[in-house]
Image: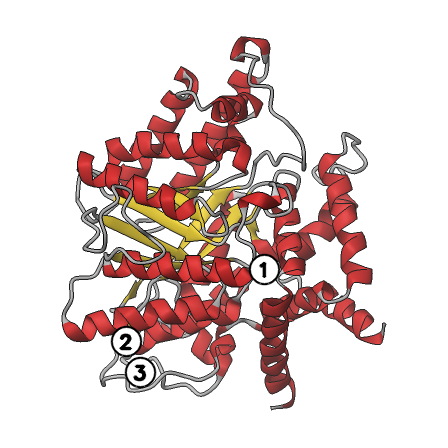
Amino acid sequence: MLKSQQSLRILQHASKPPHLILTRCRFLHSDQSQRTISTTASTDPDTYASTPAVTPTLPIISQPSRPLSLLPLPILLRSYALTALSSYPLLLSPSLRLLSLVAHSSSAFLNPDRNPLLHYLLKKTFYAQFCAGETKNEVQKTVKGLKCMGYRGVILAYGKEIVLEKGEKIDTSSSQSADPTAEKDVHDWKEGTLQTVEMAEDGDMIGLKFSGAGRDAMRQLAAETLPSEAIEKATTEICDLAQARGVRLLFDAEQDAVQRGIDAWTLHFARRYNKTTLGKAVVYGTYQAYLRSTPMTLAKHLANAQQEGFTLGVKLVRGAYMGSDPRTLFWETKEDTDKAYNGMTEALLRRQWNGILKPSSGEKGGKIPAEVAFVLASHNHDSVQKAMAIRKEQTESGEVKIDLAYGQLMGMADEVSCELVMAAKARGAVTFEKTECAGPKAYKYLVWGSVGECLKYLIRRAEENRDAVVRAKGTRMALRMELGRRIWG
């Protein structure tokens, strides 16, 4: 209980947002913009995290051995407090029940967007850990803070979404005309997503959730129909703006009841927007490795891309809906899921069919003929290391490589993310505005919106922290070691 109380006290003092690191970055940048220094010159972790625009004068031979030294102290404190909290069921379980109650209540008292005290408590804890901000100004400060640390970019998403409760069914017999809020839902979703694209910069990515377009969109997805005229028009407007701004769109996977509809809509827009430059994609689909059906689905989509001449954008995740979808859909064990994830990753990186990802036409072996752009979205250190090893091998052999980016959720697996950032810094120059390097491209996925709009997302992140016991333990130990090093040296 003493450790629990200590964790809560740490959390109370860790509410400073990620963008506070910017103050120091900007000061150093303006003061030293004419200086040329090595990106590994500083031995102080806080100074290293705040390195300004630099151009190395000498080849960088090694990289720092402490990835979490990149984290500003307020983020380090909050991350440790929340990961410690997740290891105490007596504290986490009531917290999750409270979050769920708030998310599904129609009471003004339990609405964090109307209750100032509740808003403050959530925003300074769970929200600050996983979300970018409620306003454009807050979002931009958070994003700049991450890029200042060395991330190539961000995956920014509008937080509004619909999550079905376990066993909840969608009435596919109703129509849009029967839903008086359908038009407003689509309009609000479109405006929120367009605003998200406007906040992104060239090279960033946008997470797009069709469930954010409302219940009627969910009905259409569940019925596996073409998008309505309103959704078609709204999505086209979003895609046009993203393409014009050099921003990529990651169409998120959702629950099984609507996933086949999402796959169909994703291909529908990929055919239109992924033909401009083969090997590059504007529209990406998300594939969940914990589903038994995913290798076959991915193989079919690769065949479609090859036959119709467009690049297949692939974001590969392990999955986030085990608590609400039927258990029979998943692999039997975590090891099976890991095998599927790593097998599909290797097949895509090498563009070579293997024992996991097999051609849908039935032939054996051979090259994957389709053009692919790949986002490896994983918190698993082993999966990331395997991918990096393949890329290193390909670089040394001169083999042509597919477009690859790595992504982790904001507030989670920082030891993995920071290691990628350091690997990139060790391979090239890091400038204040943009990372230019031959190393891995690391991104953080973060949502924005009001606390109330992001609640369902926050619940899923908290649940994921609780369920991933092994990974959370490793993260907690790494955070504790870095915190101890800063406090006691």
Residue under label 3, please give it.
38
Q: Residue at x 15, y 66 (%)?
A: 399
Residue under label 1, please give it.
17
The image quadrant that residue 431 belongs to is bottom left
Q: Amino acid at mark 3?
A: Ser
Along the line of sight, which residue is nearer the eye, 47 or 284?
Answer: 284
Along the line of sight, which residue is nearer the eye, 136 or 89?
Answer: 89
Distance of mark 3 from mark 1, alpha carbons? Answer: 28 Å
Along the line of sight, which residue is nearer the eye, 13 or 392?
Answer: 392
Nearest to N terminus: mark 1 or mark 2? 1
Note whether 463 is above or below 386 in the view shown: above
Note whether 190 is above or below 295 in the view shown: above
Q: Residue at x 42, y 17 (%)?
A: 228
Q: Amino acid at mark 1?
A: Pro
- Residue 329 position, x and y percent, is 54, 44
> What is the secondary structure assignment of the residue under circle 3?
loop
Q: Point out the residue furthest to the bottom here.
A: 489
